[in-house]
């Protein structure tokens, strides 16, 4: 080949590549405009979340309410026109509260105190003893006087006390319960930092096994009152609790659009449907779950035929330890389809985001292309990108298998909403319709962009690369605590 014709060929190639890119860009923006208009005028995210809360209430995994929520979502996806909607059942060691009676006072004069049991506490417990103030309930609090909690009932702060020494690192409630057991306590009462008698729940078990001692939560004012009384003189407590625990069933709900060109490449779009039982979980995770549902509705309403297969997945069991997403990944491993998952997007408490994130820096160019196209449609969306890896939601089991994960970044959550995390005040009034619409339209664009791009640059990581990613993101200790560190 002569030099001249090579240059000409190269030039033609570059030109056609450029045209192709420009064409792709134009197609993307056309699709984004349609998504934008559809969501702004027909989004059902807000009304369906409100309706489900009214009809069902909380969505605790394994409970009758949880089963109703699974069915509600299944029926809704069918009504949106999905031909392929399926339940994915899995067994769990479920837990549900039955009764709790806490009494505290000076000897001979014990008075009832409003409290809730933390999840994974014993099926039946009846303990009484002296109440001792263990500060923040951290190792250092016990180490100062290792005998102090022996045979007693511990009172400790769930969030760090205001006067804690600078740099004190707090522990998860389950770690605090484990420490109380380690130092011989008969029970533990945690008080939170949210004013107004708010009660919080969540699991008290690191491993998922039932605890050997009762663990409960009381409100901030009650906690401070008890601390003051312990300082004045001996206080005693009795705890009587009954809970239900055992094998229960839950179901993820999966709706699928088969890809037109790359049916064996899959984008999983997930959010957990389950909630705790003290409230309807409007924010955690009504926001994410009903946004995912409305993304699914949007794709159906527009008749989008993506290149890659998209699976919209409503997970159950997230709150008990990512049980639904673990079951999903387990099943994909056992039927040999795990490698088909090219990306997992997770939406947990996502609200009015301003950009996107992914676990790996290698996704930057693609995510920025999608983000900037979205930002051109509406400049209130910034289309920023950050590479970050974290834990404790349904992307985790995928990420630990090396699958690229990501989602929305820069969510807007009010102080009120954050205070009601896992609390009895996580109610529908905290939800903002326009902000939910924003979640749905921009995240639908991300889904569309990933499902239709010619090439997703980042491939599944090897085992060694996953380990390095966890180390680089400082996640080793947390994974060890949760029993998920497999590189020893
Ligand atoms: Zn959540």
Image (cartoon, rainbow, N blue to C red):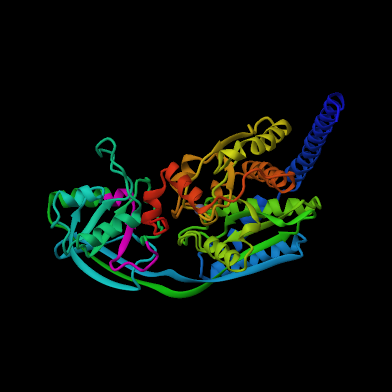
In this rendering, position of residue 469 left or right of residue 34: left
Q: Is residue 54 left or right of residue 103?
A: right
Quarter of the figure that contains the N terminus: top right
Image point 72% across, 34% down: which residue?
A: 373
Q: Position of residue 300 (x, y in %)?
A: 77, 55
Q: Viewer-proximal residue, 248 or 17?
A: 17
User: In the picture provided, is 438 more to the left or to the right than 18?
Assistant: left
**What segment is highlighted magenta in the picture?**
207-223
Dividing the picture into quarters, in which one does residue 122 lie?
A: bottom left
Instruction: Compare residues 55 and 312 and report the one nearer the observer.
Output: 312
The outermost residue toward the top is: 4
**Residue 353 appears anywhere in the view:** no
State the residue in front, 326 or 234. Answer: 326
Q: Is residue 217 magenta?
A: yes
Farthest residue, direction front = 1
Residue 61 lies, in percent from the top left, at: 51, 66
User: Is residue 274 highlighted in magenta?
Assistant: no
Residue 288 can be seen, yes or no: yes
Name above or below for residue 460 compared with residue 321.
above
Vertical position of residue 302 compared to residue 380: above or below: below
Query: Which is more toward the observer, 245 or 7?
Result: 7
Give the percent coordinates (x, y) of residue 307: 77, 51
Residue at left offset 69%, top offset 38%: 370
Relative placement, left or right, of 417 versus 111 is: right
């Amino acid at each position: 080949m002569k030099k001249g014709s090579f240059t000409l060929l190269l030039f033609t190639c570059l030109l056609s590549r450029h045209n192709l890119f420009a064409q792709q860009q134009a197609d993307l923006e056309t699709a984004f405009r349609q998504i934008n208009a559809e969501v702004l005028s027909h989004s059902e995210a807000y009304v369906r979340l409100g309706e489900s809360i009214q009809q069902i209430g909380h969505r605790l995994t394994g409970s009758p309410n949880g089963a109703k929520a699974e069915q509600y979502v299944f029926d809704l996806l069918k009504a949106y026109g999905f031909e392929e909607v399926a339940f994915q059942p899995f067994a769990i060691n479920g837990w549900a509260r039955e009764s709790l009676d806490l009494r505290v006072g000076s000897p001979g004069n014990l008075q009832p105190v409003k409290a809730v049991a933390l999840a994974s506490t014993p099926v039946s417990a009846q303990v009484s003893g002296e109440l001792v103030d263990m500060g923040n309930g951290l190792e250092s609090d016990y180490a100062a006087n290792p005998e102090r909690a022996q045979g007693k009932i511990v009172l400790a702060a769930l969030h760090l006390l205001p006067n804690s020494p600078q740099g004190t690192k707090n522990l998860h409630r389950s770690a605090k319960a484990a420490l109380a057991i380690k130092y011989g306590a008969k029970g533990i009462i945690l008080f939170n930092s949210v004013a107004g008698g708010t009660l919080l729940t969540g699991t008290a078990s690191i491993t998922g096994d039932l605890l050997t001692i009762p663990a409960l939560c009381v409100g901030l004012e009650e906690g401070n009152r008890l601390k003051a009384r312990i300082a004045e003189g001996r206080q005693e407590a009795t705890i009587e609790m009954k809970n239900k625990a055992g094998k229960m069933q839950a179901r993820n709900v999966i709706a699928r659009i088969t890809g037109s060109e790359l049916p064996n490449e899959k984008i999983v779009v997930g959010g957990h449907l389950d909630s705790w039982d003290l409230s309807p979980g409007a924010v955690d995770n009504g926001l994410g779950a009903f946004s995912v549902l409305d993304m699914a509705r949007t794709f159906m309403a527009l008749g989008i035929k993506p290149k890659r297969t998209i699976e919209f997945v409503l997970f159950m069991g997230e709150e008990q330890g990512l049980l639904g997403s673990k079951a999903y990944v387990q099943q994909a491993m056992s039927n040999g389809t795990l490698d088909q998952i090219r990306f997992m997007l997770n939406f947990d408490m996502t609200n009015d985001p301003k950009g996107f994130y992914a676990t790996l820096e290698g996704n930057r160019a693609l995510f920025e292309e999608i983000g900037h196209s979205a930002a051109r449609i509406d400049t209130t969306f910034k289309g920023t990108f950050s590479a970050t890896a974290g834990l404790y939601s349904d992307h985790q089991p995928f990420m630990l298998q090396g699958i690229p994960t990501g989602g929305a970044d820069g969510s807007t959550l009010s102080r009120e909403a954050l205070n009601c995390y896992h609390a009895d005040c996580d109610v529908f009034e905290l939800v903002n319709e326009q902000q939910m619409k924003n979640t749905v339209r921009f995240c639908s664009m991300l889904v569309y962009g990933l499902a239709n791009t010619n090439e997703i640059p980042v491939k599944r990581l090897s085992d060694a690369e996953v380990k390095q990613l966890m180390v680089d993101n400082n996640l080793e200790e947390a994974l060890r605590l949760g029993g998920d560190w497999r590189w020893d």
